[in-house]
Image (tube, rainbow, N blue to C red):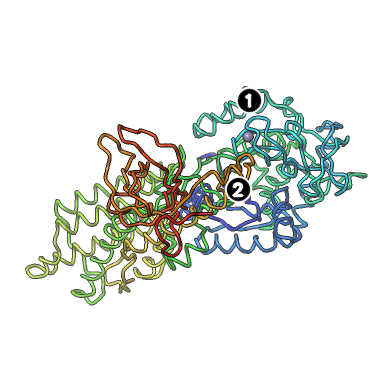
Amino acid sequence: MSNFNRTTVTAALIYANGPIHIGHLAGCYLPADIYVRYLRMQKKDVIFVSGTDEHGVPITIKAQKEGKTPQQVVDHYYQVIKDSFEEFGVSFDIYGRTSDPVHHQISQDFFKKLYEEGKFIEETTDQFYDESANQFLADRYIVGECPSCHQPGAYGDQCEKCGTTLSPNELINPKSTLSGNAPILKATKNWFLPLDQWQKSLEGYVSSHPEWKSNVVGQVKSWLQEGLKPRAMTRDLNWGVPIPLPDTEGKVLYVWFDAPIGYISMTSQLTTDWEKYWKAEDSRIVHFIGKDNIVFHCLIFPAMCMAHGEYQLADQVPANEFMNLEGDKISTSRNWAVWLHEYLQDFPGKQDVLRYTLTALSPETKDSDFTWADYQTKNNSELVAILGNFVNRAFVLIDKNFDSKVPEKLSGTGLEEAMMKAVQEIPGNLSQSLENYKFRDALISAMEIARIGNKYLAEAEPWKLMKTDSEKAGTVLNYAVQLVAHAAVALEPFLPFTSQKLFKALGGNQLAWSSIGDFEVIQANQTLENPGLLFEKIEDEVIQKQIAKLQETKKQMELANKKVPEIKETTSFDDFLKMDMRVGQIVAAETVEKSKKLLRLTVDDGIRQRTILSGIAEHFSPEDVKGKQVTFLANLSPRKIMGVESEGMILMAEGQDGELVFLSPSAPVWNGAKIS
Ligand SMILES: [Zn+2]
């Protein structure tokens, strides 16, 4: 880090086509924010840049779905996304948009320089084209039967049923989603970046960064091993940055060409001094992304920058894996997510609790799982019981015994020495974790201060000392206040809202990073302002409500996606009449020896009592079914099962949760009534 004089931190540009959820926050925005806050606390020169990606097919698809223009879609979601980030304290220096004219200009200049220097290959290929819509079709605009699992409705780039990656020409009976017609193949010219020509340089770049995270290196190396191929940097689409060349109407820059340039164009809107953040050799560029963006940030954008020649390559790309929710992949289309705007409605003022939980569960090296039970435990057992409890005890004791003023400190004893020694370890551990992007470990180090504080108070017992030696009690509380200050500083990157409350309580000024471990940082006689309880216990009912909400979502989705079995072959009316279906009453029921599934039912059919064996024992106990009126097939030929003769079959259907349901008459009827 020492060779760099400034740091340019970027966080992935997110498509402006929907609100954001915890997976986004945990994936790259929270780690990036923690990192940037850490650098700012040390007064380092750092800028934090991100924004929305407002081009590409995901935007036009959303617009089509909502019956809006792409511009309306991006205008709406830009604001929604920006607001959510602000509410959660993600402290961008600029949050820009790729639809901005400045961005268009800079992207076009970038493209033009590469074009003029002959860095592209022009190639004419056949692409699917919708004749009635007069438009070339991006992969997502083509659906057809999956060649692998034969599910209809697979997309041109992927079958969502079986997960196979596809290209549109592999689909069986491809159809355009715009018109529903079969597309034709039509020749079109595009500009390709010959990534194969940059393979050697990229290999050199990647191998010069052995410090990159193993999940990043693994993915990049597998791309390089496969061998890079030329990749089209333009697309036939009418939404995006227009190609700055004549006769290219209906073509735009590939969204992954212009999106990373967005980091640069947004920086140019932040400061007139922007070039040094991207071009100077003593500038360090760090891209925070999710694992789905690794190839673009570690290979394609670097190749673009190499071809351009003026821009520095990223020094670090700390990509995270994915965060799941309650054991299931977070999915916008299945509404399986905790949305940030909904979270704030349900948990107002609890931004830091979510930030804390997401950091503690961060998918740093492998996919992780957010559960509401973990959220509750993190809040109740850590934030309330450790941090909140320590801070509260220190403030309450000083309020009560020292008129809310920091007492004088006399020289300490062995207890203080041991406590101070433990604290001295923290700044080093904390910085090492943060600088190696190990935010989970860093959070544990920062919280260690509050753990030390609790242990210290429990051992020193200032509440007892007050009765015998108030000067000694004052000394202990002075030390405790210093520890509160250390915690406020160390936790600022993680819990900025809580830290601000603590800085205010300790006298109003934000304290410097170097204050951690400084036991003179808060002066005696400083008046304190008790911040009140920093965290409150979250009860089981509140958590149950969130889990129930998710379960309801899942149930609705399953019902909506339920595959109704196909209708059987047509049967004749005569055959139907051969079946004698009746209503009867279960008058007795008992389990069948050695069978887990069967119940032996005695059914009153109006004429006599007959025995019917039914495979319902895993769903009903004999007591459940006794007295019920049910429907049954009366003339099914008798069968011997487990030594018992069964005369007929009880009719059942499957319920919403996969349970069995009797088909009972909606009003009582006489036993033996015919069903027709
Ligand atoms: Zn498939």
Identity of the residue furthest to the right in this view: 247
Q: How many marks?
A: 2
Identity of the residue furthest to the left in this view: 468
Q: Which residue is mark 1?
A: 224
Mark 1 residue type? Leu
For marks 1 and 2, the one nearer the N-term is 2
Q: Quadrant of ligand 1?
A: top right
CA gap, disc 1 to disc 2?
23 Å
Element on which disc 2 rests:
loop
Residue 658 location, x and y as percent?
Answer: 44, 48
- Residue at the image position 62 percent from the left and 58 percent from the top: 94
Q: Which residue is mark 2?
A: 12
Label 1 crowd bin: few (<14), some (14–19), many (20+), radius 10 Å: some
Residue 110 makes an appearance in the image:
no
- State the residue in front, 180 or 584: 584
- In the image, is residue 491 above or below residue 617? below
Residue 64 makes an appearance in the image:
yes
Element on which disc 1 rests:
helix
